[in-house]
Amino acid sequence: MKLTSHLLAIGLLGMPFAGCSTSTTSPVETTAFAPVQTVLETNCVHCHGDNRLSTMPSIHDSQALAKLIGSGKWIVPGKPEQSRFFQVVTFPDQIPGAMPPTGHAISKKDVATLRQWITAGAKLPGGTTILFTSRGEMPRSM
């Protein structure tokens, strides 16, 4: 009888409780976010990743990015023009604070990708942390 109750207890521990879900990232969420991730990894993570200055917002992974999303934060869902993040990547190079600060603006295609993502609610894939890895050449300013 004791063995049966122990096996039952072990079996119950391995099962999700009613009303609780095991959170996973859906392929649709990941696919929808992939273009945004590419823009961030190509243009932002070099300076805003793990080796950033303490005064810079961190975007080394999706959890750090999530902290920048919300009303009154760097990324305002549904409102790209009110999002400081979007403003600085669309500033002309001559304006102080333009990002990236390397003397080249991000492409119009990348700007459109960010605008669309923010307009659609700046959603991140849930259930897992996505680590961002810088792509391409290091910026001159590093």
Image (cartoon, rainbow, N blue to C red):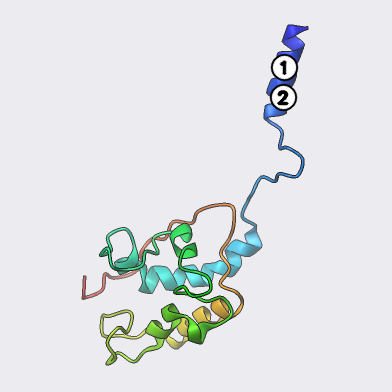
- Residue beneath the point at 55% across and 77% down: 118
**Residue annotated with mark 2:** 11
Task: Kindly state the secondary structure of the residue where label 1 is placed.
Answer: helix
Count of number-bearing discs: 2
Which mark, residue 63? none
Q: Residues within 10 Å of mark 1 (few under 14, many from 20)?
A: few
Disc 1 to disc 2, how far (Cα)?
A: 6 Å
- Residue beneath the point at 26% across and 85% down: 103
Question: Residue 49: where, in percent of width, then height?
Answer: 34, 62
Question: Residue 33: where, in percent of width, then height?
Answer: 55, 68
Task: Kindly state the secondary structure of the residue where label 2 is placed.
Answer: helix
Please report contact status of discs 1 and 2: CB closer than 8 Å, yes or no. Answer: yes
- Residue beneath the point at 27% across and 87% down: 96
**Residue annotated with mark 1:** 7
Horizontal placement of 54 versus 7: left or right?
A: left
Depth order, front residue of 132/20: 20
Question: Residue 41: where, in percent of width, then height?
Answer: 40, 68
Quarter of the rendering occupied by the C terminus: bottom left
| Residue at the far front in the pictured view | 72
Residue type at tag 2: Gly
Above or below: residue 15 compared with residue 119: above
Question: Residue 117: where, in percent of width, then height?
Answer: 56, 76
Residue 97: quarter of image: bottom left
Residue 99, can we see it?
Answer: yes
- Residue beneath the point at 49% across and 84% down: 82
